[in-house]
Image (spheres, helix red, strand yellow):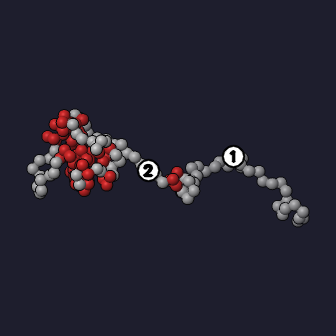
Amino acid sequence: MSGLFWFSDEQWARIEPLLPRNQPGKPRVDDRRVLSGIVHALKSGGRWSDTPPEYGPRKTLYNRFVRWAERGIWERIFQALAGHEDIPGRLFIDATLIKAHRTAGGAKGGPWPMVSAVPSMDVKPSFTPCATNAAGPGHSS
């Protein structure tokens, strides 16, 4: 299937030594396939349910991503690959796509308009009051 992301041999040679070793529990499944699937999911919007089956079980991809994020493994991998291990703070790689509902922009049914400033008292009003009698034409007071 075209359009899938796979780490090249050169890329994988740099990544593989950075992966955690001697973890308790069941042995991990093919790391290269799972990590390629995680990158594919993140590049295409982060929808784990849309990940092609060639990468393995979707739950495995999600669980590996979340667990490694909690343990800081992704941050260590990114820092090592970037070659800046002494940089304080965090390294973010992001291609976020945010979808907003049409009402988020103030369309019909959206939020009430907000007034950003109090109008000044010396500004003329945008309307001119009618100079006729308040009771209307043809009526006398």
Image location of residue 84, percent across then percent down: 23, 35
Mark 2 or mark 1: which comes first in sequence? 2
Dot 2: element: loop
Q: State the residue in front, 114 or 107.
A: 107
x, y (%) of residue 87? 25, 37
Q: Residue at x 33, y 49 (%)?
A: 46
* Image quarter hosting the C terminus: bottom right
Which residue is pictured at 30% across the width and 50% down the height? Answer: 51
Graded by Cα atoms within 10 Å as few (under 14), some (14 to 19) or many (20 or more), the crowding at tag 2 reads few
Residue 89 visible? The answer is no
Q: What's under tag 2, amino acid-wise?
A: Lys
What residue sits right under mark 2 in the picture? 99
Image coordinates of residue 103 in percent, x first then y, are: 52, 55
The foreground one among 97 and 49 is 49
Disc on res. 123: 1
Q: Quadrant of residue 10?
A: top left
